[in-house]
Image (tube, helix red, strand yellow):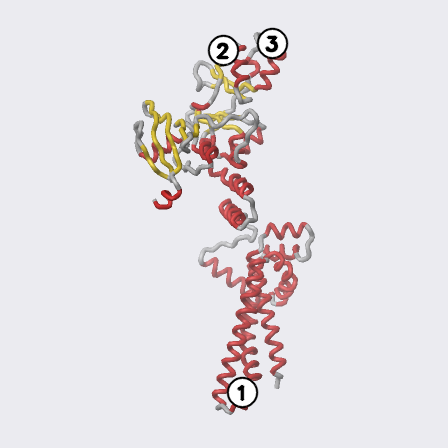
Amino acid sequence: MTSPWLSLFVAFLLLAANAFYVAAEFALVKARGFRIDALAEEQTFGAALTQRILGNIEAYLACCQLGITMASLGLGWVGEPTVSAIVTPLLEPLGLPQETIHLIAFLIGFIVFSSLHIVLGEQVPKTFAIRHPEPVSLWIAYPLHASYMLFWPLNWLLNSASRNVLRAFGVQEVSHHDVLTGAEIESIVESSAEQGALERGVRDRLVGALDLKELTVADVMIHRKGIKALDIDLPPREIIAQAMASPHTRLPLYQDEPDNIVGILHARDLLRGVSEHGRDGLDVRALMRTPWFTPMTTSAEDQLAEFLRRREHFALVVDEYGALMGLVTLEDILEEIVGDIKDEHDIAVQGVRPQPDGSVNVDGTVPIRDLNRMMNWDLPDDEAVTVAGLVIHEAQAIPDPGQRFAFHGYRFQVLRRQRNQLTALRIEREAEERMEGG
């Protein structure tokens, strides 16, 4: 007859095996392929094998399930009877009926090993593997691979059966190395920022880069009414004077009408021309560069890629009919990622005039994104590009001067209107207590 102490030793081995396979299962599911790849490049022990395991993860998960099932069945077969066999002699001196003694011994064995099974065999290894998936994956790689090879026929049978069942329900097999979506990456960044692992500035830059694909050129461009262009037919001295007075290094040149852009004048080319030919002998047409036009539906992400590919900093934005809508610069897009980029020649957002009472007088053509960036506000820009467009969208009409509105936590008052355009508005943020109460 087998010694109960030997059976108890076997039971604890089965408990350890159960814990091992549980940890292996959760570590492989939670491990991130790019981290394992990085460890493999550093030649960390077990990383190369873990890469292979993750490449065939479904088969190894079947091995884990087989190990968990066999260990659990073994515990039920060995553990509880063993404890009962140990406890029964201790209860007999109490003089209780044999049926009662056997029942108590069974309950003690059930409670003891069920508790050990749940805590040590399931919860502890599972939690540990979830918290440290990559290190655990490296630790379990070789023993798991050994057990996989040992039970390969049974593993193959179970894995094939599970694949066929999933295939019957139309579930396609996927790679463990599927690329994370932008939303998933943004969720990770947000979670890391909330936990203090990322500073706010770093979080804003990462999210800004991810959000570029959600923006179009129309969202970040300077509207055509805000373009400071030069008349190419002006005398050279006048063109030089206006260019020198401008804070911009690239200036559009128009002919006959402002929307007819015929070239781009770069300040560096202008200075070279003045140096070579003097002010009166300057030929602006010979200095101007060919304008680059881009559709207003182009995503900010694609436009950034084009700026980098062409080594350009400046593009004119047109609609589907070729009509000029505005201009976009490399700096405009980069500011969506890193925030304001200021230098000694920058000027404040034109058309935004903060007032002593905390309100802000704003021209209707001011882009919402520029106003948000300057005032650290959060006005929505999904339905409109400019402040006037936002008020018209919310009011579902073109308001008259003096009309007031409140939405999105801000109060708006129309100051001036010209024909069908709102040219000036006053905006102020509602008090926090009023916002909470509303």
Classify 10 Å Cα crowding around label 2: few (below 14), some (14-19), many (20 and above).
few
Kind of element beneath mark 1: helix
Give the residue number, with chain letter if any, for mark 1.
91
Give the residue number, with chain letter if any, for mark 3.
278
Kind of element beneath mark 3: loop
Q: Residue at x 55, y 27 (%)?
A: 313
Classify 10 Å Cα crowding around label 1: few (below 14), some (14-19), many (20 and above).
some
Direction from residue 16 to residue 359 in the image, left or right: left
Kind of element beneath mark 2: loop
Q: Are marks 2 and 1 in contact (CB under 8 Å)?
A: no
Classify 10 Å Cα crowding around label 3: few (below 14), some (14-19), many (20 and above).
some
Q: Amino acid at mark 1?
A: Leu
Depth check: 325 or 384 in front? 384
Give the residue number, with chain letter if any, for mark 2.
234
Q: Are marks 1 and 3 in contact (CB under 8 Å)?
A: no
**Residue 226 position in % (x across, y down):** 45, 24
Q: What is the CA distance from the residue labelled 1 to the residue labelled 3?
A: 114 Å
Taking the view exactly as shown, the residue that stands out farthest to the bottom is: 95
Q: Amino acid at mark 3?
A: Gly
